[in-house]
Image (cartoon, rainbow, N blue to C red):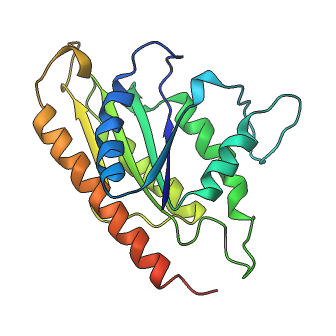
Amino acid sequence: MRAVVLNCTLKKSPEQSNTDLLAQVVIDELTKKDVEVTSFRLADHEIPPGVVTDLGGGDEWPNVHRLLLDAEILVFATPTWVGRPSSLAQRALERMDAMISETDDQDRPVAYNRVAGVVVTGNEDGAHHVISEICGGLGDIGYTIPGQAWTYWNRGPGPGPSYADTDEGHEWSENTARTMAANLHAVALALAERPIPA
């Protein structure tokens, strides 16, 4: 089984990403279940805005699209900015919009029989709002969202330390991340055994 992590941090490598640190807990748990995981940091690549799979002219989204089609599990990871998903998270959803009209050999949307979950970090409140926005978009595209397939960390309202700067709240976020990984894996296995019919 394969999983892809779309890290929608605004930070380019090798700058430390708090979102990446929390997503790594999910990755580690999936790896324990023999899932092959590929992580992709969108900020490191040329991904212009649009709603088609390939815009040409150096567009690197087709590489991401191939990863999505090769994976049964998607982990969509984003920081929170002004109470919303990052601009790169929104861009990824817009580019994934093309998948609604792409079909498999049984005329099902290509995202059918694939599962997705969400990781959110940030100093601002609003993680549940971000999770809802992303899950809503992924559901439209055709992904199955298992129950409790999300985790988040935020310090609450106002400025303060980032995920990497404090241990506050880590135990809850990491336990929830491990539950997220288990639920994603379990539902992906169920769909592999009994796929959504055409």
Position of residue 70 relative to residue 194, above or below, is above
Q: Position of residue 141 (x, y in %)?
A: 59, 61
Q: How many marks?
A: 0
Position of residue 174 relative to residue 191, above or below, is above
For the C terminus, the image quarter is bottom right
Q: Position of residue 79 (x, y in %)?
A: 39, 29
Given residues 33 and 82, the one toward you in this image is 33
Given residues 62 and 161, the one toward you in this image is 62
Q: Is residue 109 left or right of residue 86?
A: right
Given residues 100 and 62, the one toward you in this image is 62
At 35% from the left and 37% from the top, the residue drawn is: 23
Q: Is residue 162 visible?
A: no
Q: Is residue 125 visible?
A: yes
Position of residue 136 relative to residue 62, above or below, is below
At 22% from the left and 55% from the top, the residue drawn is: 179
**Name of the residue lying farthest toward the right:** 57
Q: Position of residue 164 (x, y in %)?
A: 25, 18
Q: Position of residue 54 (x, y in %)?
A: 82, 43
Q: Is residue 128 left or right of residue 135?
A: left
Position of residue 160 relative to residue 49, above or below, is above
